[in-house]
Image (tube, rainbow, N blue to C red):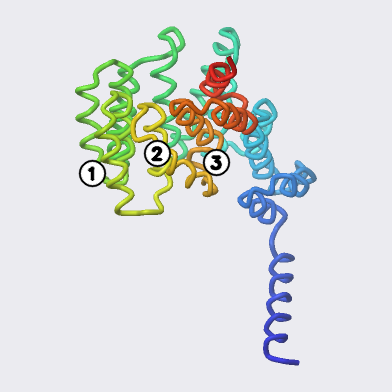
Amino acid sequence: MSKLIYLTVSFLLLTTVFAFTQTKLEQAKGLYEKGQLEQAKKILNPIGEKEADYAAARYYLGRVAFDEKNYDDAADYFEEAVDTNDKVADYHNWLGNTYGTIAQNANVLKQGMLAPKMKRAWEAAIALDPKNIESRTALISYYTQAPGFMGGSMEKAKEVATQIKKLKPAEGHLQMGNILMREKKPAEAEKEFLEMVKVDPNYVSGLANFYTGQKQYEKAFTLFEEALKKNPEDYTSIYQIGKTSALSGQKLERGEECLKKYLTHTPAQNEPSHAGANMRLAQIKEKKGSKAEAKKLFETALKLDGNLKEAKEGLERVSK
């Protein structure tokens, strides 16, 4: 047997042994992280209540359902995970996230029922994991968006942002700046965003987005271009240049170039979607007078994400 064949066979044997030594949960988790949702479900569904991994299996089924936008199913799975094991912060965090997502499109009565549930879920996650930033950020959104009779409070939101500053200063400044923007205090918010970048330059997109929102487009373009000089593969900045171009009507050629490049990239979980990139590219085409191209791109964006309001509005404009 040649050395190459021997090494190949050895590798295959080791791979097979590794697969057999993995638990069903570990196999399913690996499949989920690779985006192989159907395969993950086939392994997770049979895990029964009496098995040690039942709570974790329900949690991952919830993550799968959430990714598939089956939010009611996701809530059921996360509730089962929490009922089985209420000592895991992530279970509570994702239960709160799911309640919040359902509430976005619910009527006022259902929102009123979900509000205390999501708040309790995030608070439980923080109690279990005092360094939990994600749940604190979710609470800030809750406090700034909920009406007063449901527990909304700008002061409570600021308290949470101050807590985040102690854990992760740049994120705390970002959250405080966002709160101040909701209070329509842009000058104070800008100070927070500038301090944020001083603490951690990787947060530059937050400052640039502030300038975009204030229609100070040249400042935004400059920040994103500077970020690209430091890292030419910074796809978030590549997307943001395109988005800023689409919103401002400025640097349209550069914006189109960046969005086309972004569409060759597979977005990570926290990066802008291809649906959004197609929509922004459509807006650029519309501004350049290419209605037929814009229409096709708006249609593509809506096929990828039918909830994009701006894409629906854009399609109506270019279809007239």
Q: Is residue 169 visible?
A: no
Tell me the residue at 53%/38% (across/down): 273
Residue annotated with mark 3: 88
Label whose residue precedes the other's in the sequence (1 or 2): 1
Where residue 224 sits, quadrant-wise, is: top left
Gap between marks 2 and 3 measured at Cα:
49 Å
Where residue 320 sits, quadrant-wise, is: top right
Residue annotated with mark 2: 253
* Residue in front for this viewpoint, 51 or 216: 216
- Identify the amino acid type marked 3: Val
Count the numbered circles shown: 3
Contact (CB < 8 A) between labels 2 and 3? no
Q: Is residue 23 visible?
A: yes
Residue annotated with mark 1: 199
Q: Position of residue 112 (x, y in %)?
A: 54, 11
Q: Nearer the viewer, mark 1 or mark 3?
A: 1
Label whose residue precedes the other's in the sequence (1 or 3): 3
